[in-house]
Amino acid sequence: MRQFDAIVIGAGQAGPSLAGKLTQNGLRTALIERHKLGGTCVNVGCIPTKTLVASARIAQLARRAADFGVETGDVKVDMARVKTRMNKVRGDSSQGLSTWIDNMNGLEFIRGHARFIGERRIDVDGEILEAEKVFINVGARARVPDIPGLGDIPYMTNSTILELDVLPEHLVILGGSYIGLEFAQIYRRFGSKVTVVETSNRLIPREDSDVSAAVLEILEGEGIQFELGTECVKFEKRDSTIRITTSRDGAPNTISGSHLLLAVGRKPNTDSLGLDQAGIAVNERGLIDVDEQLRTSADQVWALGEVNGRGSFTHTAYNDFEIVAANLFSQQPRSVADRTDCYALFVDPPLGRVGLTEASARAAGYSVGVGKLKMSQVGRAREFGETQGFMKVVVDADTDKILGAAILGLSGDEAIHCIIDAMNADLPYTSLRQSMHIHPTVAELIPSVFGDIDFR
């Protein structure tokens, strides 16, 4: 048995940063990883997918060049070169992370599969490790639904679709939420026919209905086809075609495509960790139960990142690291309850989101005021010829507190940070209403949208 002061299981977004903090504070640390450094974000998530988003945006802008007085020829997408560029970007990120870990004093990096065999006791492919503190950062993977025939056909997940170096003739996507919509627009802009099948009656159902409707309008305008309120009943392989039997309101239908992408949720990587051997509780979805400081039910064991169900994003995983590190090594305790929930949908134009939606604020019993402004009123959007979408803010009529916001439009994923920072500072909405922003930018209209709140 080998003894360490700390063991970190998983080298995703939180793991290496935490290992660095532990070693800086003199703890002899083991970092265990069974697959690739960087986890989802570096390898199959943010970095490669946003690289594809960038390539798809260039293709779309080239098609629109004449709108700006620029003459171009036919737009052609070379998928092999697109993939090469993507691999270069994610490879550089992975190499940088590897170099950092290799040069981390006091750290031992161990390649292998970790499994608990007792209280803070871990088996890594036959080698037994033990530590005073253990941190779990093992992430999640794509969920594969149990639908007849699915196991008999070739399908892709958000991970395996990145290996494509050819253009699908007709890409069918199961799931009309964040991952599915990003890939739908990417491949439509590359030139594929794309159909999205969603069980809900609207896209991204966690958002307000006006946001869902606007995203649908944008994507339908680019030629993406949607089958909403539709269940997949059966899959079949017919020569080179994937045949999908669907049902909407009891009426059967058939969709045929060349490729199938599953984007119907995520499953935590906890099923082979032996958590029960260490007294670590999980919920019915396999997510590890944690308190507000990310401690599990087992003493001196923490869970960070997507595996704890407190956030499914790279930025929430990194914030988990910051919370754990602050509670271990500083005199200023931090909590998950202190952070402001925020995220983005990286379709083009993007959706930046923070806090509550209008619907969730009303459901929570708030007396709500709403401000809304079309992106067509934003000078920067008109100058760039990208006037789709709107800004929307939600405030508490009783306290002037900002409850949430959505910016769907040009630079919405950046402009939303003005509101995120104000919410983090617990400023009233009137402080933003009175601020002066730079012209011409997207953010300059944020004071305007807060200046026209409807409290009805």
Image (cartoon, rainbow, N blue to C red):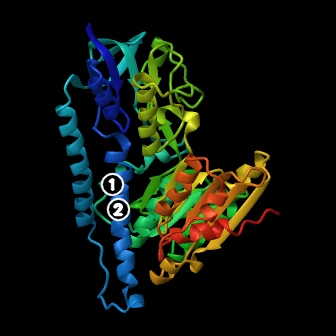
Residue with the mark numbered 2: 52
Asked if 100 appears above or below 432 in the picture, the reply is above
Residue displayed at 54% across by 36% down: 310
Which amino acid is tagged 1?
Pro
Which amino acid is tagged 2?
Leu
Asked if 122 appears above or below 169 in the picture, the reply is above
Asked if 443 appears above or below 329 in the picture, the reply is below
Expressed as whole percent of the image width and height from the top left, the position of residue 129 reads 30, 13
Residue 433: quadrant of the picture: bottom right
Is residue 50 visible in the rendered image? The answer is yes
Residue with the mark numbered 1: 48
Could you tell me which secondary element the residue under label 1 belongs to? helix
Could you tell me which secondary element the residue under label 2 belongs to? helix
Expressed as whole percent of the image width and height from the top left, the position of residue 74 reads 31, 85
- Is disc 2 in contact with disc 1, using a CB cutoff of under 8 Å? yes
Report the quarter where the N terminus lies. top left
The mark tally for this picture is 2
Answer with left or right where residue 190 lies relative to residue 231.
Answer: left
